[in-house]
Image (cartoon, grey):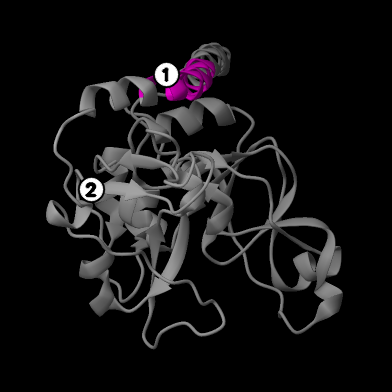
Amino acid sequence: MTGPRLKDLGRWFSGGTPPSERAEYWDGDVPWLSGKDFDKTVLREPTKFTTAEGAALHSRLVPGGQTLLVLVRGMALAHGLPVARLPFDAAINQDVRGLVLRPEFDPAFVYYALVGRRAELDAHIDRAAHGTARLMETVYSYRIAWMPELAVQRTIATFLDRENERIRSAIRVAADTLTCLDSSERSIADAVVHGLPRLPLKAVATIHSGVTLNEAKAPAHAVSVPYLRVANVKAGWLELEEIKEVPISPGDIPHYALKPGDLLLTEGGDLDKLGRGALWAGD
């Protein structure tokens, strides 16, 4: 049996941005969320706060608990539809839509229903827009495949929450184990390559630095694209939970774009003079 359409799940709200030159609208107590505050399916800690007046006059205050956030405009849409649960009251900007669900729908269940169908929802993303991507209005007619009664929704959502936490815990343990093994791995690697002929890295690879950040002077006609920074490069692995964006000229993208198999190295850091390194697998 076919479930309800997205537009029938509750009330959808758009947001806005208080004028940046009006100091009385900023640094208040109300979290103000934009696309930068959630990544894929994870809501981050708020980075900006508005005042109650700023939220009322120039944004939209949506209640936590029964609300989902959906990104409707931004480069992050190029990688699939970002969806997040909102646990606290917050204001949203114009690139975010808030869905305040009706009482008969469990927010965690609807969240998992959307996350599990991101591949289907991908068809409603228009990537042809200049400089950014946007979510088309057709998405609101998308139907949830199955919507059981509320008690069953909550049982399923509780199970998925528990299993997801187990997976996250396993990932944290694995990361800690890799850190502990790091010194041993270097010793083994040194033993393996000892006595082998040495070549300069430039003899086997093309080497270049990444984008130089200069927020005060963005290039003309720049587009905002995801990029990896030093904090993302760990010792043998990549931390991809938080991906920032950088303004760049479209013509420079082919030069800086990563390809699967590229080796990322940081300069300096916590591993003697070489920094850290990890392979980009295309994730």
Q: How crowded is mark 1: few (under 14 residues within 10 Å), some or many (20 or more)?
A: few
The residue shown at (65%, 72%) is 17
Q: In this view, does 122 lie to the left or right of 266?
A: left
Between 208 and 142, the one nearer to me in the picture = 208
**Three-letter code for the amino acid on which mark 2 is drawn:** Asp
Is residue 123 magenta-colored? no
Q: In this view, does 94 lie to the left or right of 228?
A: right
What is the x, y in percent for residue 89?
75, 46
The residue that label 1 is drawn on is 184
The residue that label 2 is drawn on is 262
Q: How far apart are marks 2 and 1 (CA)?
A: 24 Å
Q: Please give the range of residues in magenta.
A: 169-185
Residue 176 badge = none
Q: In this view, does 272 lie above or below 1?
A: below
Q: Is mark 1 on a helix, strand or loop?
A: helix
Residue extending furthest toward the bottom: 220
The residue shown at (49%, 24%) is 179
What is the x, y in percent for residue 23?
83, 78
What is the x, y in percent for residue 265?
36, 49
Q: In which quarter of the image is residue 283?
A: top left
Q: Quadrant of residue 256?
A: bottom left
